[in-house]
Image (spheres, helix red, strand yellow):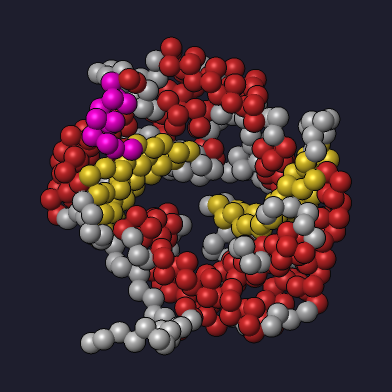
Amino acid sequence: MVLDRKSPPAIHDAVNFEFNLPPVNKVTLDNGLPLYWLNAGVQDVVQIDWVFKAGLWYEEKPSVAQSTAALLKNGTSKHTARQISESLEFYGAQFKVNAGNDYCSLTLYTLTKHLQVLLPIVHEIITDATFPEDEIEIYKNNTIQRLLVNLRQCEFVANQKIDAVLYGEAHPYGRYSRQANIEALVRKDLVSFYKSRFNLAAATIFMGGKVGNSEVKLINSIFGGTLSSASSSIEPAFAIAGATDRSFKVDNDPNGVQGAIRIGRLFPNRHHPDYTPMVVLNTLFGGYFGSRLMANIREDKGYTYGIYSSISPEISGGSLVIHTETGRDVIENAIKEVYREMDILCSETADDEELLLVKNYLLGGLLGDLDGPFSILARWRTLILNGFTEDYFYQNIRIYKSITAPELKSLAQKYFDRKDFYEVVVI
């Protein structure tokens, strides 16, 4: 068959595609640990995540969760931090530990053939971390230096301030590290948090890539034989205590020519029925490069190189925040234009062409997510950790495809009332 190179191929909108989330397999290891795995991709690579409830939500002292995560792989009773690092580098593997608001994830990327060697190292890190005093001191010194550098950047300070304003500084989602918190860290804080929160009995394991039953058996042989008592099921609770004032200005650099703007409000998490429709509205408003905020404040007014609005869902809440950096002489004008775009969303109905563009953008991104094993695994991990099944995924698809412009206008009137927003300006 000869290709017709004179006529362009037909263009199909993403809204007309059928979506299929590849299924995930679940097995229970010999000691009761859940392992979710999927075989996808053509390259001999694998990603494995060990997820613990060890985020900021569970720390009793500031900076403990992130510090414990950072030092987890910096020594065991058998190997030093350098030996562990060299072992991982020798096999070309990446091992990352990240503590977020709710969870701490340990992630291994490697060639499938190296799992036999690398999995015992990960097991040793999880079950036998020692937190050497010298490593703690190095970490504290380096972290303080990075913090001092970051505090000179208006966008860093603005990100800290908006979370504290929305949730309250005592709330885990609003808490941020200070130099005094880092200086006050002692080894027993880290060891205590490690023993209570990195218990294998409380882990959830995810594996994706070119894997099969042999890799599942290998994980079971290494992680399924560890006997651990379950962690306490008591979940801590925190009250949100947002700021009384709605507007804050921080003079961070008297010589600065640029200011950081954050305009935000609290917003429900993924379990709320308005969450998915709001993803569509937020995308139109400021969620991608073709959004209204970008068209107005970047392209038309030239106040900034970029402006975005993002929804951050957490297990126990969430927020919607507009963020940008502008010249200090146009800060007030930029803020006025943000609210002007909110008012337009509340008073005018979007046209069908703009809404179709947004739908195609969102659904096109989903198509990309379903193309690789690691992104598919991430999709499943989000579902499982939030207590959803694949039904939630397909429900979102239906909403993306069917939501109407009048529905978005009604949603805007509910969530884009300017009196519900906080402003933070850092110069």
Magenta span main SS: helix
Residue 241 appears in the picture as rendered:
no
| Residue occupying image coordinates x 66% and y 66% | 291
Residue 63 appears in the picture as rendered:
yes
State the quadrant of the N terminus. bottom left
Residue 308: percent from left, percent from top: 66, 57
Choose top left, top right, bottom left or bottom right for residue 153. Answer: top right
- Relative to 267, residue 239 above or below: above
* Residue segment shown in magenta: 83-94
Front residue of 65/249: it is 249
Residue 284: percent from left, percent from top: 65, 70
Front residue of 368/380: it is 368
- Which residue is the extreme one toward the front? 6
State the quadrant of the C terminus. top right
Choose top left, top right, bottom left or bottom right for residue 233. Answer: top left
| Residue occupying image coordinates x 59% and y 26% | 146
Front residue of 3/109: it is 3
